Image (cartoon, rainbow, N blue to C red):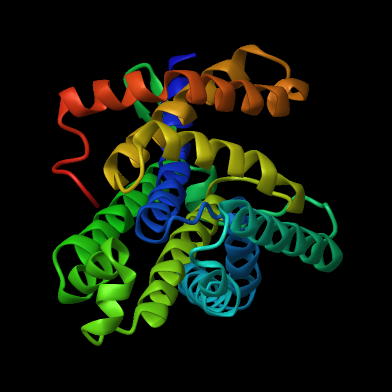
């Protein structure tokens, strides 16, 4: 069971990366992107398709580009038009995009399970009582590095400063010459790229299918709620925690209960999010206020 917990935590790092992108967009634009789970699956398929012709690193790069293009187009083509409108319109729009991506994946690839074949996929690392899948360990490290890179870009660069200024006061940003719609488009591109990159890493660690997007969205949303808007590292840590829980319960419970487990995790996150944020804050996870 300890190995199931550890491998679940490693897989949770991928949820954490997607949740970091989700919560960054939430903080910057006020949009809850309900297509984030579908974007993970899109990244998984992009990586799988390119890896079959070239190699896995090329597939991950393509997954990043696919996510960036989808996110930018979604923000510029739809979400920027809904800024200042009731929030349910953006929820409906992103949910519809997620459904469209799920349907497209099912049409193109059916519901057959896919996985990117790799040596590390079947390699197991033994550390005392723990038996860790090498692919999961590599994917976790990549997800942590990507989360750190996203946080650094948003918090310690001129672009991040301009983006945060625009998010605080859009009208003032426009008056000072900031290209607010374009900045928000790049923010959405980064958020979506985090999800597709996480999905690409997912394709290296085990099988996936076109119908996995909704379950992933539940875990992403739960991690984001526990972490709080704009708290990238807290969202990442919450994803790791949820992955550990899911891995342990999945080891003990029948596979048929997986979807029910996802709903239970979401409800628990809704109830416990304030206390969990306080606990993460006391441990120092999340750094300073704002985007961290």
Q: Is residue 124 visible?
A: no
Q: Is residue 118 visible?
A: yes
**Number of numbered tags placed on the structure image:** 0
Left or right of residue 17: residue 157: left
Left or right of residue 114: residue 1: left
- Answer with the quarter of the image where residue 92 lies: bottom right
Between 201 and 173, the one nearer to me in the picture = 173
* Residue 124 at x, y percent in the picture: 45, 36
Q: Residue most toward the bottom?
A: 177
* Residue 144 at x, y percent in the picture: 31, 49
- Answer with the quarter of the image where residue 96 lies: bottom right
51 up-or-down from 29: above or below:
below
Between 138 and 168, the one nearer to me in the picture = 168
* Residue 31 at x, y percent in the picture: 49, 56
Q: Residue at x 61, y 69 (%)?
A: 46
292 up-or-down from 58: above or below:
above
Q: Residue at x 49, y 25 (%)?
A: 269
Q: Residue at x 52, y 19 (%)?
A: 268
Left or right of residue 42: residue 242: left
Left or right of residue 126: residue 231: left
29 up-or-down from 57: above or below:
above
* Residue 53 at x, y percent in the picture: 63, 78
């Amino acid at each position: 069971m300890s190995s199931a917990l550890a491998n679940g935590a490693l897989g949770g790092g991928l949820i954490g990366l997607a949740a970091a992108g989700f919560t960054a967009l939430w903080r910057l634009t006020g949009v809850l992107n309900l297509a984030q789970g579908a974007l993970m699956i899109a990244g998984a398929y992009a990586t799988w398709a390119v890896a079959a012709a070239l190699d896995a690193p090329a597939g991950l790069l393509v997954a990043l580009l696919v996510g960036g293009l989808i996110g930018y187009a979604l923000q510029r083509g739809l979400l920027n038009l809904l800024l200042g409108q009731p929030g349910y319109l953006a929820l409906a729009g992103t949910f519809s995009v997620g459904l469209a991506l799920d349907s497209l994946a099912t049409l193109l690839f059916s519901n057959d399970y896919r996985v990117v074949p790799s040596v590390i996929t079947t390699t197991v690392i033994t550390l005392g009582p723990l038996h860790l899948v090498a692919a999961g360990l590599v994917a976790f490290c990549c997800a942590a590095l990507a989360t750190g890179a996203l946080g650094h870009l948003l918090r310690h660069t001129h672009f991040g400063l301009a983006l945060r200024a625009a998010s605080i006061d859009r009208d003032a940003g426009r008056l000072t010459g900031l290209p607010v719609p374009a900045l928000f488009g790049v923010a959405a591109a980064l958020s979506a790229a985090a999800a597709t990159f996480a999905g690409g890493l997912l394709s290296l660690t085990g099988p996936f299918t076109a119908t996995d997007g909704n379950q992933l969205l539940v875990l992403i949303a739960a991690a984001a709620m526990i972490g709080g808007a704009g708290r990238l590292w807290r969202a990442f840590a919450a994803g790791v925690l949820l992955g550990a829980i899911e891995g342990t319960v999945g080891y003990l419970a029948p596979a048929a209960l997986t979807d029910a487990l996802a709903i239970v995790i979401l409800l628990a996150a809704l109830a416990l999010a304030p206390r969990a944020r306080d606990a993460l804050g006391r441990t120092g996870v999340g750094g300073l206020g704002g985007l961290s």
